[in-house]
Each structure stands twice: as C-alpha cells, then as structure tokens.
Amino acid sequence: MNSNPTILALVLAGGEGSRLYPLTAVRSKPSVPFGGRFRIVDFVLSNLVNSGIRSIYLLVQYKSQSLIEHVNHAWTLSNAIPDQFVTVVPPQMREGPEWFQGTADAVYQNLNLIGSREPDLVAVFGADHIYRMDVRQMVSFHQRNGADVSVAAIPIPLALASSFGVITADDDGRVSDFIEKPEQPVPMPGRPDCAYGSMGNYLFNTEVLKAALLEARERGENDFGRHILPRLIRSHRVYAYDFSTNRVPGIRDYEEQGYWRDVGTIEAYYAAHMDLLGLEPRFNIFNPKWRIFSSGYQGPSSKIIDGQIRNSMIGAGAIIKGGSIRNSIVRREVMIEEDVVLEDCIIMDYTIIRKGARLRRVIVDRYNTIAAGTQIGYDRDADRARYHVAESGLVVVPRGNELSSSRYS
C-alpha cells in the first residue's frame, strides 16, 4: 500500500441511545447537544477532517431528522476540492424492507458507496464519543504492522468493561481474542482493575472489509464486534491500536492525555460536561491547533446584566439578568432572570429560567420555560413526579415545545 493511502470514512450515527433517555426521546444519540455549542457527532467529524480524511458518509437511522438538519447546516465542505464531502446516508433498504440490523449490516447495505470510491482503506468509526484523535497516527500504525484490520483500543475500568468489546493482544498489538460485551471481562496483564476495550473505531483494508461483509451476509451475521472481528482474528492480521499513544497538537499539560468518554448514560454525559469546566479542565474544548467544528451560529453575543457567575460556560446569545450561576454550562439563547440559582447544571438552548427558580444538578433540554420560584434538584420524590430522575439523582427536564418557546414572552 502506498504511503499516502486514500481513505473513505463511514461514520455509524444511527444509535438509538436508549440509556440517554429522555435526551434521546426526539433525537438520536449523536445529535444530542454537548458543551456550549456542539453536538456529540461534531467530535468524530472534526477528528476525521482535522486528520485530512474528508470523504465521509454518515450512516443514520433512529430519529435522524435533527442530526440530518445539523449536518446539512454545519458540515457543508467546499465542492471546489475533489472527494471532499460529508454526506448523510439513511437506510437504503437495498436488501429488502428492513433497517440496519447491526453495525456490520449498516456497512454491508452501503457497499455500493465503497465500490464507487475504491479507497485503499475504509475507516468505520462510531459517532457518539467525546475525544480528540489524530487518525493519521492510527493509519501509520496500521501500515507499519501490515495489518488487515486495526481496532482503536483503550484501558477501561473493569467494572465498566461489560459494555465494551474486550481485546486480548500481544505485546506488539496483534489481537488474539475479541469478545463483545463479556459478562466477565478479562483484565489486562499487570492491570487487574482494567480491561483493554474497543473504542468502536476500525480501520480496514478495503478488500478485506468487502469480503468479510459478504461472508457475514451469507452466515446471517450483522455485527462487527460479535461476528466479523472474532472471525477475522483467526484468518487475518488484526491489530489493536493503543489510543493512549495518540498525540494531538495543542493539548495542554494539565489535560487528561488520551481523553475519551463514552457518554452513553445520563451520568457519563453529565460527568463529561463537568470535565470541561475549571481553569485547567480535563478536556479543554478550545484548542486552536485541533478545533472542534460545528454550526456557524449567526446570533448575538451573550449579554450579562447582573449576577454572580463562577466556573461556568455561557453560550452565545444568552441573557443573564441576575442571580447566581455556579459550575454550570448555559448554552445559546438562554435567558436567566433575576434571583435565579443554578448549581452544577446543564441548560440547553432556547430555555427560559424565570425569576427566583432554584436548580441543582439538573439537565434542562431545549425549549423549556422553568416557572418563577420552581425548585428542581432539592426533593427527589417531587422531582420524580414531574421529571426524569436518574439513579444518581440527576434530574433531566425533557425537551419542551419549540413552537411555544419565546425568550421575550
């Protein structure tokens, strides 16, 4: 293979995200808002584009309208450069009236897209993780080892590893075993508290991928982790790429090196937001050498009339009339009225928090109006009667009605 291979990316963005309910009640997991102005999908797309991989198909499925609109608005690449595109692909149902039945089936149903491009390598990446990654370094690893398949991997706490594909690899990275979501994960050698977990990012030699997908179809198999990878290990050179060795320019010394989070639960989603805060955050969202791209918002700057704000992010177009905001993320075009108290909260776009409201450890989805004097996060039984309360006690206020929302009413 040449030193500068052509690469086609297929991003699996059809995740239902049931564990993130109710944030996924009306949208897919990759389209859930994150941070001050992003969607979860923006992270994988930014990593690919920053790595020079700009032929990207985004395979969508569940509740995809929000994601389609976001990608069409935020990810239109220049047509002046050949093979530069981010294209949304819904299920084509070429094999009959059925949606994607699994990760491998999603790619199989789009083999025509691979055939029309004839790339040297195909990157099959997930769309629902928060991280920065220079994919070129994984490509170099893949070529150096003469791999047929490379799987990005990272140590995972053993208590969480049952939710991941668990890898057993030799010292040089060659994979000898891969078990998808095992009940009793095998710990890493010398690290009994961790397992070597797949990040769900794969790099395939194109012909190997095509042959594996055709064989899987004949066998009635539909998943990379459960079916294709375990079988390829026995016949091909499958390697685990150690993500902890990946170095992205612009990362500060105080950041967590190799930061990667699966934000598949309310608790994990909330914790990843808290990692953005502070003077020296674990994950600094601003890195001019490796930007996270999103929509080019054309609204006004935020306006702060009065109040106390500590260790918080305030999005564009927000109006802060008063009150106290601490350890919180307030997204764009939110209005906070006088005497409001927000503590450890995530407030999404186009929300109004009326005078005197008190919120603690609350996630408020878009288009909500929190009435004057409301208290959320102080009485779990009262919160359960009105909202969604996670096992940890975090309260989620589901998305409101866009048509009835107005900051100035």
Image: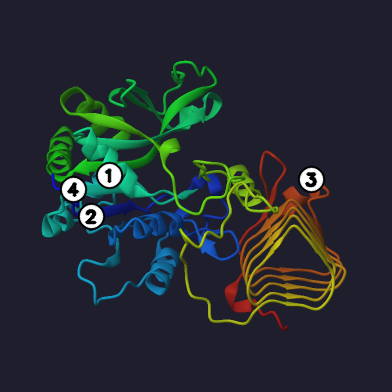
The residue singled out by tag 1 in the image is 139
Residue 253: which quarter of the image? top right
Q: Mark 3 points at which residue?
A: 381
The residue located at (58%, 74%) in the rendering is 402
Q: How crowded is mark 1: few (under 14 residues within 10 Å), some or many (20 or more)?
A: many
- Residue type at mark 3 is Asp
N-term-proximal mark, 2 vs 1: 2
Residue 3 disc label: 4
Mark pair 4, 1: CA separation: 10 Å
In the displayed structure, would residue 94 be above or below residue 206?
below
* Circles 3, 1 touching at the beta carbon (< 8 Å): no
Q: What element carries label 2?
A: strand
Q: Would you name the residue on which mark 2 appears?
A: 8
Q: Which of marks 4 and 1 is nearer the N terminus?
A: 4
Q: Where is residue 234 in the image (x, y as percent from the top left)?
A: 19, 22
Distance (Cα) linking label 3 and label 1: 52 Å
Q: Quadrant of the C terminus?
A: bottom right
